[in-house]
Amino acid sequence: MKEALKRLLPESVIAWVRGIQASARLRQETRRQMRRFARNYAKRGSTRLAHLETRTIFFTHQIEKGLSHGNFRHGFGKGVLAEFAPLLVAFRQQDANYRTNDIYRSAMSALHDYKVRHETDSYDLTYMRRDFPDDIWQEIANADSRYGGVLTIKASDKADNASKTFVELSESRHSLREFSDEPVNAEDIERAVDIAMRTPSVCNRQPTRVHIITNADLIAKLMPIQHGFNGYPFPPALVLVTSDIQGFMNPDERNEGFVDGGLFSMSLLLALEEQRLAACPLNTCLPAGRDDATRRLLNLPDNELLVMYIAVGHFLPEAETCMSRRFKGSDIVTVHA
């Protein structure tokens, strides 16, 4: 019956029917995805250990960013510390082995460095001492700095990037938010884009699009909207990676733009490193108003999804960055034999 109808009906009618079916499935699958996310994301106040770990990593990163800032500001992060303290109390209650949990140890290390940095400069830490219980305060004082804090990145160590192995390049790349005053030309970034073009994409459809922004006034308007570069000088160049939705063919591919765009962005970050350009990925998880404002400033078409920004510049002679301790591969692997 179905085959007979397909032979009888004009293609335009079949396309119309399938379009209605696809729209219904898109709404259904989007709602299903939304419900799964709502059930599982790390809500504030949750005592699920995985949620506590997520929020601990986030706050550790906030402290490390402040510690790595070239224009160090004493007393930074008071709001973060006020939230961090009860979070760590809950962490200890939920994880009997918290002392050997690398996430907890990274937090302790970052807080230790915060404490030492301020005390070395004779800065009053009454506000911090007030937030933390005695036992955690003592643990912060005695923490091992190897698990968190900051790293120093030297431009001289990047001279041989082009001859490094993939492993060496991957292990030496770090996100940097502060750059030299040397201008970055679009051509410098285009060379890295050419390298990244070997990135795979769904059925080779190559939906990724790259917007290179070197106009300082435009960057100055975009960065406050992105809202993740506060306190830092604006980068000399900004890359916006997007994905063209026109490259996808059915509702099942609704997330593929972020997958392909993410793959391309990692290739581009490594290519920028190989080209001796410092970079930092910045998310574009923007609410509707800020998304619209970004689109207006860049005159972006409706068919492009925002995947991420990448701030780009030349390396400073020396700069500090977050240690951002990584999990081990064995921490994230499940083998299904």
Image (tube, rainbow, N blue to C red):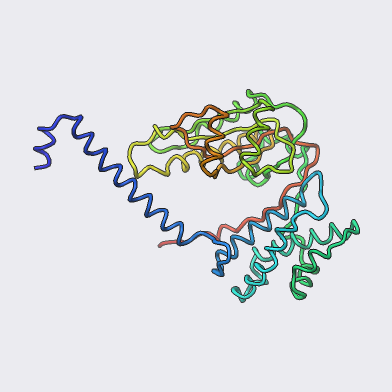
- Measured as percent of width and height from the top left, residue 60 is found at 68, 58
Q: Which of the pair 240/322 is nearer the observer?
A: 240
Taking the image as shown, residue 224 lies to the left or right of residue 143, namely left
- Measured as percent of width and height from the top left, residue 333 is found at 50, 59
Instruction: Please say if 49 is above or below 117.
Output: below
Q: Residue at x 61, y 37 (%)?
A: 310
Split into 4 quadrants, where in the image is the N terminus?
Answer: top left
Q: Residue at x 56, y 28 (%)?
A: 298
Split into 4 quadrants, where in the image is the C terminus?
Answer: bottom left
| Occupied quadrant, residue 117 | bottom right
Q: Which of the pair 121/13 is nearer the observer?
A: 13
Q: Residue at x 42, y 54 (%)?
A: 34
Q: Residue at x 63, y 70 (%)?
A: 91
- Measured as percent of width and height from the top left, residue 128 is found at 79, 64
Taking the image as shown, residue 75 lies to the left or right of residue 310, namely right
Q: Which of the pair 332/96 is nearer the observer?
A: 96
Taking the image as shown, residue 245 lies to the left or right of residue 239, namely left
Q: Which of the pair 95/172 is nearer the observer?
A: 95
- Measured as percent of width and height from the top left, residue 173 is found at 66, 43
| Occupied quadrant, residue 192 | top right
| Occupied quadrant, residue 225 | top right
Instruction: Please say if 301 is above or below 145.
Output: above
Residue most toward the right?
122
